[in-house]
Image (spheres, rainbow, N blue to C red):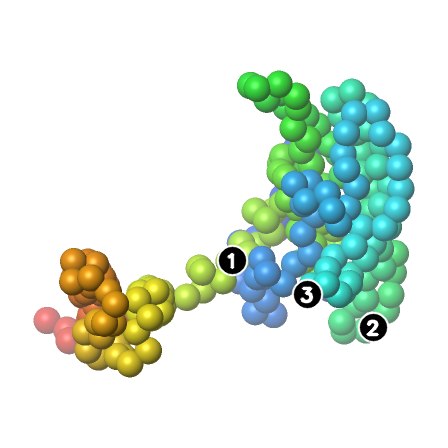
Amino acid sequence: MLGPASFCTSGRLGIPEGTGVSRDGWRPHIESALALDLACPSVGPVVAPNVKQSGIWRWLRDGEEFAAIRYSLETADASGTLELGYVITDRTTADRRVVCCRINLSTTRLHFGGVRWWMHCPYTGRRARKLYKFGPIDQFCHRTAIRPLPTYASQRVSGCERVMAQRWALRRKMGDDISDLFEEPWKPKWMRSKTFERFRDRDADLWMKEENYLARFLSRLRPRTRR
């Protein structure tokens, strides 16, 4: 199981050991991680100067709680610490162990007055408003602190699929439930001609992008001939 021991030390900060795909093929996804978000105090503590409190940080999905951890928060005028306590289970051995994650807090002054609170990654010290807990990693960390780098859902979609999704969204916006992507959009009776022409031209531009993506994909499939 990956954890703090998977990080080598460079100077004062811990950085991930190695780059590229992990040995077991693990590729982290942002959506699968628990996120500590200081901009969303409704599920966690309200960070403010000179505060000392503890409680439960809860995560909700569709109104249902699916994760919870204990926290202890203590701040001064411009800095503080956030300590998290939780239990993780080794997927291989099913062993359970307690983890204490200590996160340093700092502030920056805003131009319009007040301050903004930041968390610092336990591994890299990098400042962030969000830290993530990925399954194989012991502690919450910045999204750039692990290798391979975690990806968003939009990054795992090919360019062609993204263009096709935009064309379907265009038809939904028009109220067109008749045409498909192999033909021009269908004009609803209530839509003005100029408005329809604008939608049609946009669909034509997207169709050209889709064709270019497909052409590049097919060119990669062709066997290369030696000169």
Q: Name the residue under label 2.
A: 94
Where, by quadrant of the figure, is residue 204 drawn?
Answer: bottom left
Q: Which mark is residue 62?
A: 3
Horizontally, residue 11 falls left or right of residue 57, namely left
* Amino acid type at image mark 1: Thr
Name the element at disc 3: loop
Name the element at disc 1: loop
- Quadrant in which the C terminus is drawn: bottom left
Q: Give residue 182's position: percent from left, percent from top.
A: 22, 79
* Amino acid type at image mark 3: Asp
Q: Residue 82 carries which label?
A: none
CA gap between label 3 and label 1 equals 23 Å
- Residue at image position (80%, 50%) is 57
Horizontally, residue 180 falls left or right of residue 58, namely left
Dot 3, how many residues are within 10 Å of its Cα: few (below 14), some (14-19), or many (20+)? few
Sooner in the amino-acid sequence: mark 2 or mark 3:
3
Dot 1, how many residues are within 10 Å of its Cα: few (below 14), some (14-19), or many (20+)? some
- Residue at image position (89%, 42%) is 54
* Amino acid type at image mark 2: Ala
Camera-nearest label, 2 or 3: 3
Q: Give residue 55's position: percent from left, percent from top.
A: 88, 46
Mark 1–mark 2 CB contact (< 8 Å):
no
Horizontally, residue 93 falls left or right of residue 191, namely right
- Residue at image position (83%, 42%) is 83
Q: Is residue 103 visible?
A: yes
